[in-house]
Image: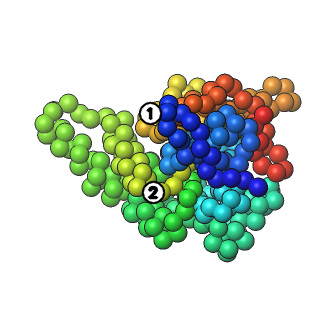
Amino acid sequence: MFLYHVPVTLSDYMVERVKTGIEGLDKALNGGIPYKNIVLISGGAGTGKSTLCLQYLINGAKMGEKGLYISTEQSKQELYKTGASFGWNLEQLEKSNKIKIAYFDVVESDNFLEKIYELYTSFEPKRVVIDSLTTLTDSLLVTGMGKDGAFSMVKIAESISPIPKTERIVSKNLLYHLLKKLRLFESTILLTSELLEESKGLSADQISEFICDGVVVLKSLALGETLNRTLTIKKMRYSSMDGGIKSYDINDIGFSVQ
């Protein structure tokens, strides 16, 4: 049986933790993710970001905690198929109101922040996943939120200073808006980000790693016929953690960390 809250003494106060249910990862996190932290799960294609996030919600459901999965890349049916490959019946979990899966088409949708908040307030999950932050941020750059929110701030700034503001500054403003909204949630949140092999940063935008409370980087490298997968916790606010390189595997029952 899993336990949800694990009190751990840290710097003379108690840290409330949320177990991922992935034993090796929880051990490296000194018991789990600090409650209400926003954690970036970053990695290249095929590294298992979505699998880890789905398993986080599945394990939460086993602990009696509702989970919300917001996808901007895979449809609900595609996620059902992914879950089924690991023996997870996501459709049944949705019917029993233990998880909710919402797909946002980034081409046709807008007002993402309002929609995400409406989903949260109606479902009241303890765990939230947004997969992926990369496509969500890109879409916000061309929607009303970008025009009315971050872009308006950039225009005000440019009226004071004639120096043109870069897309990086606009993206940073968008990310601050997003995280400000997410911090209203009484939830512990995972966000995924694509990471190119040659990237110098820890996310596609190279900004998220500084704003999020935690960063977990997944990497895979083919060595002959062997696929070497490694996980590194680069950052976790309000907690001590094991930042060493860990091996992980994705098998027929899901994501496991050595």
- Which residue: 23% across, 45% down? 153
Rendered location of residue 161, percent (x, y):
15, 33
Foreground pick, 37 / 131: 37
Q: Give me the disc on residue 71.
A: none
Rendered location of residue 42, percent (x, y):
58, 38
Residue on which disc 1 sits: 210
Q: Residue 53: in sight, yes or no?
A: no
Of the 4 image quadrants, the one containing the N terminus is bottom right
- Which residue: 36% across, 56% down? 143
Whichever of labels 1 and 2 marks the residue nearer the N terminus, that label is: 2
Amino acid marked by disc 1 = Phe
Taking the image as shown, residue 250 lies to the left or right of residue 164, namely right
Taking the image as shown, residue 49 lies to the left or right of residue 12, namely right
- Which residue: 37% across, 41% down? 171
Rounded to the nearest whole Å, what is the CA distance between mark 1 and mark 2?
Answer: 20 Å
Residue on which disc 2 sits: 185
Q: Residue furthest right?
A: 225
Taking the image as shown, residue 247 lies to the left or right of residue 124, namely right
